[in-house]
């Protein structure tokens, strides 16, 4: 178990927090990131992101959700299965290489950013090295949990991959038991045991962009 991650990464989520702190509209995001004259042009934002520049939460949102409009989204994505094996065997040097390769294709992967931070930490690298991946990972998670409240499909947390759903469930809300999972329209609905950090027994994730883009690829 990554006790380190649980201690550092778990954030308290209050359902009384101001809702919809981030308004996620995919059409508006697409328009913003495809304008070459805009500071929000995706290649510009991605360079700042990869250089670990200081970014606003809204800019992280454009990078995360804007990735769905990039050619590499859903195409030639490597498997994450190797991560679990390397982590279990504590082969952290190899895990770093695997994460670097993955991030070169999918820079907004929660799992790859998390494991980069963890591996660098386990190898006793300077805090500045693992902290930047930790901060980026936490910012991306914050984007997701500020995109809704999870209580209905209409107010679901918006994600761009199924893997991110489980990351939010397990490492942000500290969910231990998933009783049932089902697809309801364009949302994944989970029936869970409530936790200190998420007190409802139902949580919805809006996975619409992945479903729509997957369908477009099949056409």
Image: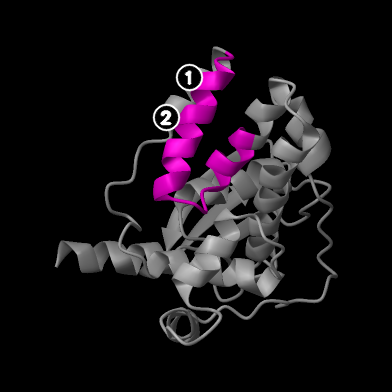
Please provide percent x and percent y for residue 95: 52, 25
For the residue labelled by badge 1, is the local secondary structure a helix, a strand or a loop? helix
Q: What secondary structure is the magenta-colored segment mainly?
A: helix
**Vertical arrangement, residue 134 with respect to residue 204, above or below:** above
The N terminus sits in image quarter: top right
| Front-most of residues 213 and 127 | 127
Residue 105 has which mark? none
Q: Dot 1, crowdedness within 10 Å: few (<14), some or many (≥20)?
A: few
Please provide percent x and percent y for residue 18: 81, 76
Are the two marked residues, 2 and 1, in contact with CB atoms closer than 8 angstroms?
yes
**Vertical arrangement, residue 153 with respect to residue 205, above or below:** below
Residue 85 has which mark? 1
Please identify the residue farthest to the left as the structure is shown: 219
Please provide percent x and percent y for residue 43: 45, 69
Q: Which residue is drawn at 42% across and 37% down?
A: 101
* Residue 108 visible in the picture: yes
| Front-most of residues 200 and 174 | 174
| Front-most of residues 99 and 17 | 99
Please state if 179 lies on the left or on the right of 134 as rendered.
left
Q: Is residue 128 magenta?
A: no
Please identify the residue farthest to the top as the structure is shown: 89
Q: Which span of residues is magenta-colored?
A: 90-116
Judging by the rendered image, the residue that carries numbered circle 2 is 81
Q: Residue at x 69, y 42 (%)?
A: 171
Q: Dot 2, crowdedness within 10 Å: few (<14), some or many (≥20)?
A: few
Please provide percent x and percent y for residue 80: 43, 35
Please state if 216 lies on the left or on the right of 72 as rendered.
left
**Vertical arrangement, residue 20 with respect to residue 119, above or below:** below
């Amino acid at each position: 178990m990554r006790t380190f991650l649980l201690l550092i990464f778990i954030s308290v989520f209050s359902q009384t927090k101001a809702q919809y702190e981030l308004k996620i509209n995919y059409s508006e995001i697409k328009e913003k990131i495809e304008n070459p004259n805009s500071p929000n042009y995706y290649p510009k934002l991605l360079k700042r992101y990869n250089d670990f520049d200081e970014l606003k939460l809204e800019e992280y949102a454009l990078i995360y959700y804007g990735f769905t409009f990039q050619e590499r989204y859903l195409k030639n994505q490597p498997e994450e299965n190797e991560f679990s094996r390397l982590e279990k065997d504590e082969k952290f040097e190899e895990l770093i290489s695997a994460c670097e390769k993955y991030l070169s294709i999918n820079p907004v992967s929660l799992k790859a950013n998390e494991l980069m931070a963890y591996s660098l930490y386990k190898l006793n690298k300077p805090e500045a090295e693992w902290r930047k991946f930790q901060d980026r990972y936490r910012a991306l998670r914050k984007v997701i949990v500020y995109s809704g409240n999870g209580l209905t499909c209409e107010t679901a947390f918006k994600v761009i991959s199924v893997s991110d759903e489980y990351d939010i469930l397990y490492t942000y809300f500290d969910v231990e038991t998933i009783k049932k999972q089902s697809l309801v329209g364009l949302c994944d609905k989970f029936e869970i045991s409530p936790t200190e950090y998420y007190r409802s027994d139902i949580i919805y994730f809006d996975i619409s962009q992945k479903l729509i883009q997957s369908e477009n690829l099949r056409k």
